[in-house]
Image (cartoon, grey):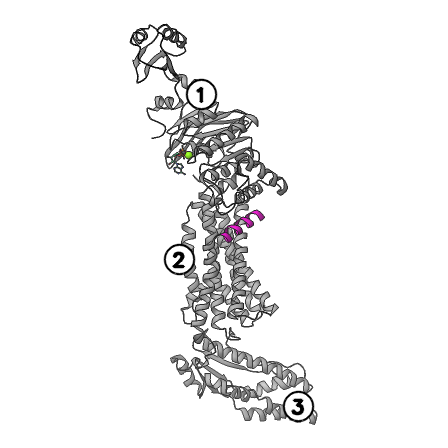
Amino acid sequence: MRPFLIKDFKIMLRDRSELVALLLMPFIIMGILGTALSGVMEGDTSSIDIQLAVVEEDAQQEGIAAFQEQVRNSGVPPEAEEELAAAAEHMNPARLLNNMLEDPELSEMIHVQTMEQSDAQAAVRAGDVDAVLTFPEHFTEDTLNAMLMNNGNGSELELLVSDEGSINTTIMEDLLAGFTDNLNAESAIAAAGAGGEEAASIEIGGTETLSQNEPVSAMQYYSIGMAVMFVLYVAGTIASKAFVEKQQQVYNRIILSGTKTWKYLAGKIISTAVIAFVQLTILFILSALVFRTFELTSFSFWIGMLGISAVLAVCVGCIGGLLTSLSIRTESDTASGVFTGVIVTLFAFAGGSFFPLDGMPAFISAFGSWTPNGAAMNAYIRWVQGFGWSELAWPIMQISLVSIAAAIISFLVFPRRRSVSS
Amino acid sequence: MLEVENVSKSFKGRNVVEGMNLYLEKGESIGLLGPNGAGKSTTISIISSLIKPSSGDVKLNGSSVIKKPAAIRKVIGIVPQDIALYEELSAYENLLFFGQMYGMSKAGLAAKIQEVCRLVGLEDRQKDIVKTYSGGMKRRVNIAAALLHDPEILIMDEPTVGIDPQSRSYILEMIRNLNIERGMTVLYTSHYMEEVERLCDRVYIMDHGKVISSGTKEELKNILSAEETIYIDFDRVYPAMYDELQHHQDILRASETENGLKLIVPKGSRLLSRVFQITERHKAQVTNVNVSVPSLEDVFLHLTGRKLRD
Ligand SMILES: Nc1ncnc2c1ncn2[C@@H]1O[C@H](COP(=O)(O)OP(=O)(O)OP(=O)(O)O)[C@@H](O)[C@H]1O
Ligand SMILES: [Mg+2]
């Protein structure tokens, strides 16, 4: 297999126009887009404007009083009783949440109106508000009981959103998730302090958590976007070179040497993957060096980047194999031509290389998330935002599935034994 | 050792090779001669197991190549009609790659590469990129690549197309040496008569996908008329002698040329000595004599009514 790799590598390195197309072009475009669009993407919070309706079905003061009453009747020692009463005031979840929403920085983005349930429902349906946050009946009492006395199942905040998956909704969900996590952790400590056992938690009902840890800079976005787009061209390039091999009978020479056809194909897949991996690595490091896109010194960060790159590179390798098979089978370079001329551009748009897909119809983003570049982009961005490995599992799974499919098809399509059909 | 048995091949319903029969003995040098589109390259692809024939079989030492292509692939070296090399790599890198494809070890390969480079006369520039080579040099590397694994049978598809006379002469000489000194079996394809005449023991003449004639060079030429042409030039005109020769009973025809006479005589009649007796008698001074035997070109013309090349 090594001779194949060395040969393909040398040929690639000696083709100056190829190097320009695979390294210089994406580098220049990331520079241009990253600089030009930095205002649009970065920290410009004024563009975020969330209308939130809050429905109070809970009575806080009564809830606290009821809780304190229960504590008194539960027969705990007097010191603990005092402590718990104070904690109830201090940790009153509804008040904490309201405080958070009124925080000056947040209140610039989130505009809170208090409404009746029926009005709120109507407003969210009409699109006048983005989300409705409901404090259910006995929320304060139930959560305090669960948190501090380990009594009952706590309560659930209800978040009703108008547009699942939109940036605004996502921010709301993240905020609430962060808040409840925080509160649960604190209540565990408080409960421990009060001599109670492990506390139950409060939850947010009816929503799922999605993305957006740290904001991604435009330069980061387009470095990733261009890298995942241009890495696809490696597959087309290798396939078109394979076609030239076939056409110039070098392929026949390889077959005549007794080399098995599957070895030839596997060689193509591996050399495409290796070249793609090197390209991605060079692009990210260049971007980090020249544009200061990524922290250069964080070892664990780069391990993640290289890990995602490796998965993507293997996928590009398999696509390269598929295009090679098609080229050899059909004895024409139409397949690689269509791929580099049409499909890459299509994938790049759908995968979000040029702009985020938030405003796009759902089927486009669904399709985009299945393109190798789109899935890889999701993974890279989550990683840059500081999400853990578990958040990368799905996109990596998507890329792997595409790889396996491409590999299987390429081996099925590749002509056996003889180089000329019919 | 190699037999092509009644092989036919059609592409999209058009017969390209029809009922081809051909055999190759060990150590022989065989020529496959035919004009453009005769089906020479297709025949070679079938022999080398790259194309499956529509019917018929190819046998190597009695066993079918079509069923088991591995056997023939080991023993043949193919020089394709087109230059089959990586243009971006040097000759050395090309040879290294193809040698490795044959599973040759790196150490043995390095020595072998030097050997074949010496053979084709390319030692000096083997590290240069093939793209920068002249046509003749590319042809030489194209041949070298077929020799790396010491093939028993060397099959060459018009290996001298489009190169300068010097390179061509060098290549022909080299093939002759491989055939004679190393006992390599050679199948040589060309539409240059002279090459085949110079290199080959036996010749197959192909046209429109069929072998129209085959045999040793002599056998083929015997197909042609049983006549020979003798051209004799003199220092001046000798009318009496001309008259005598024109009326000689064994000379079929005699006609005046610019510097002398053209005599048509029956083949193998050993007339030349008798002609010289006559010139002696007339004290005529002979400046030039030329006995012309038919060429394969003439044979082809005779068989098809067409010239090999236009
Ligand atoms: N793959 C193919 N598909 C269709 N037709 C083909 C194919 N290969 C060869 N032919 C046809 O078969 C005929 C014989 O071709 P071939 O290359 O064997 O001739 P050749 O004797 O080698 O000619 P040349 O001297 O020009 O090389 C030609 O008419 C050619 O067009
Ligand atoms: Mg030919």
The amino acid type of the residue labelled 3 equals Ser
Viewer-side label of 2, 1: 1
Tally of numbered tags: 3
Q: Residue at x 59, y 92 (%)?
A: A89
User: Taking A40 as reference, is A54 above or below it?
Assistant: below
Of all chains, the one bearing label 3 is A
Quadrant in which the C terminus of chain A appears: top left
Is most of the magenta stretch helix, strand or loop? helix
Q: Is residue A2 magenta?
A: yes
Element type at marker 2?
Answer: helix
Q: Where residue A347 sits in the image (x, y, percent)?
A: 43, 61
Q: Which mark's residue is nearer the viewer, 3 or 1? A: 1
Q: Nearer the viewer, residue B231 or A8?
A: B231
The chain to which mark 2 is attached is A
Badge 2 amino acid: Val
Dot 3 corresponds to which residue?
Answer: A74
- Please tell me which residue lies in front, B104 or A68: B104
Q: Which residue is mark 2?
A: A342
Q: Which residues are magenta?
A: A1-14
Q: Is residue B141 left or right of residue A199?
A: left
Residue at numbered disc 1: B217
**Looking at the image, is A106 positioned above or below residue A321?**
below
